[in-house]
Image: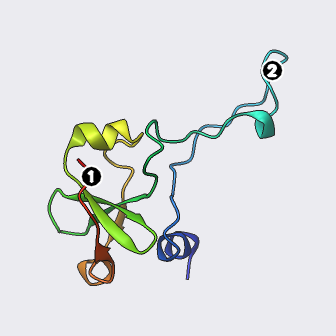
Amino acid sequence: MGYFDEQIAAGQPIFPPTEQQAPSINQPAQQDQVENKPTETAFIGTPVRIINGGDNVYLIKEGKKYWVTTLEKYNALGFKLGDEVKMDKTSMDLFTEGEPIR
């Protein structure tokens, strides 16, 4: 089982890698910087799209899948199209359905 598989199975968020730069004199060291998190902290999950499953994007959290109903809401959570992990329908069906994120 790979890193992403373990993160998805555990319901942990997967954030896209950020470009790392060496700290400057006016910039704190990397460990002191705040991690890049979604702008709305009420819901942090792993963005997932079903392979050949249409345009729906879900966030996976604690064993549940939550359909994100609009692109605006998806962006407000700090994600952009293309951040999604691809998952086959059989695997996606293992998650119970949560309330849609509106």
Q: Residue at x 27, y 52 (%)?
A: 101
Answer with the quarter of the image where residue 45 lies: bottom left
Q: In the rendered image, which quarter contains the N terminus?
A: bottom right
Residue 43 vs 18, above or below: the answer is below
Look at 18% across and 68% down and name the residue there. 52
Residue under label 1 = 101
* Residue with the mark numbered 2: 24
The secondary structure type at the circle numbered 1 is loop
How busy is the neighbourhood of tag 1: few (under 14 within 10 Å), some, or many (20 plus)? Answer: some
Residue 78 in percent (x, y) is at 42, 39
Q: Is residue 90 left or right of residue 31?
A: left
Residue in front for this viewpoint, 65 or 51: 65
Q: Coloured how?
A: rainbow
The single residue placed furthest to the right in the displayed view is 25
**Residue at (32% x, 68% y) in the render:** 65
User: Would you say 14 lies left or right of 51 here?
Assistant: right
Res 54 → quadrant: bottom left
Q: Nearer the viewer, mark 2 or mark 1?
A: 1
> Where's residue 79, x and y in %?
39, 43
Foreground of the two, 39 or 55: 39
Kindly identify the amino acid type of the residue bearing the numbered disc 1.
Ile
